[in-house]
Image: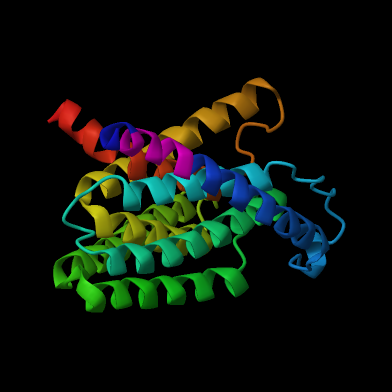
Amino acid sequence: MGDQLQDWAPPVVMAVVALGVALLGLPVQRWLAETTYRKPDEVDEPAPGRRWWVPPALGLSAALVVHRIWFVGDEAIPTVWVAAVLTATFLLVVLACVCLAAMDMDVHRLPDRIMWPTMGFLAIGISVAALVGGGVEPWARALGWGVGSSVFYLALALLALARGSVALGLGDVKLAGVLGAALGWFGWPEAVTGIYAGFLVGGVVALVLLLSRRVERGGHLAFGPPMMVGALLGLTLGPGVVAAFG
C-alpha cells in the first residue's frame, strides 16, 4: 500500500501544483495587460491580445520544476532544506520567465526591470541553497554554467551583429545566464540539453512562422521563449538524452 501511495504521489502533487499555480497566474495575466513596459517607439505596436496561455504555462512549468526537485533524487538536492530553497527560487524564476516571454513575444525585448532582479534573486537563492546543505560543488557548477552560457550567447550575438543581424540581443545573453545557472545546479546533462534544445525549439518555431507566413525571411523572432522551453526540456529530459547518446 505504501508503495502504491508513493507511486501516486508525483502525478497528484504535480496536478495540484499545476492547477494552483495556473489559478495564481490569472492575476499575472491581468497584470501583463495593464503594466507599462513598452518604450515610446513601441506604443503604437499592435496589441498582444489576452495572452490566455500565461496561466497554463505558469502551472505546467511550476509542476515540472517541483517534480524535478522533489521526485527525482540526486546528489544536487541532498536535504529537504535545499529542496525548499530551490523550489522557492526556481518558482520565482519561472514566474519571471513567463512574464518575460510574454513581453518578448510582444516587443521582441526582455526588459531589464525584470531581468536584473531575476538574476539577483537566482544568485541569492542558489547561494542560500549551498549554505543550507547543497555544498560548494553545485553552486560553483551553477555559477560556471551561468557565466559560460552568457559568454557563449554574447559571442553569438556579436557574430550575428558583425553579419548585420540583430537576431540575438543583450536580453538573450542575460537570459542565457539565468537559464544556464539554474540548469547548472543540477548537472551538465541538464545544462547542455537545455541550451541545445533552445536552438532546436527556436528553429522549429521559425519554420512554422515562415510556413504560416506570419514572419518574412530575415524577420525578427522572439528567441527568449524558445530558450525557456529548451531549458524546461533540459531540466526534465537532460540525463536521459545524454545517456541515450553516451
Task: Determine whether, in the image, residue 83 is placed left or right of residue 222.
Answer: left
Q: Considering only vertical position in the picture, is 196 above or below 141? A: above
Residue at horizontal 64 percent and vertical 20 percent from the top: 211
Q: Quadrant of residue 205?
A: top right
Task: Judge by depth and name the residue closer to the eye, 177 or 91.
Answer: 91
Task: Determine whether, in the image, residue 57 is placed left or right of residue 47.
Answer: left
Residue found farthest to the front:
1
Residue at horizontal 31 percent and vertical 77 percent from the top: 128
Residue 110, image x, y percentages: 59, 61
Task: Determine whether, in the image, residue 94 is placed left or right of residue 43.
Answer: left
Residue 138, image x, y percentages: 20, 64
Residue 221, image x, y percentages: 60, 43
Task: Judge by depth and name the residue closer to the eye, 54 or 192.
Answer: 54
Residue 129 visible (yes or no):
yes
Q: Considering only vertical position in the picture, is 170 above or below 50? A: below
Is-magenta flag for residue 9?
yes
Q: In which quadrant is the C terminus drawn?
A: top left
Q: Quadrant of residue 178?
A: bottom left
User: Residues in magenta?
Assistant: 5-13
Residue at horizontal 20 percent and vertical 35 percent from the top: 242
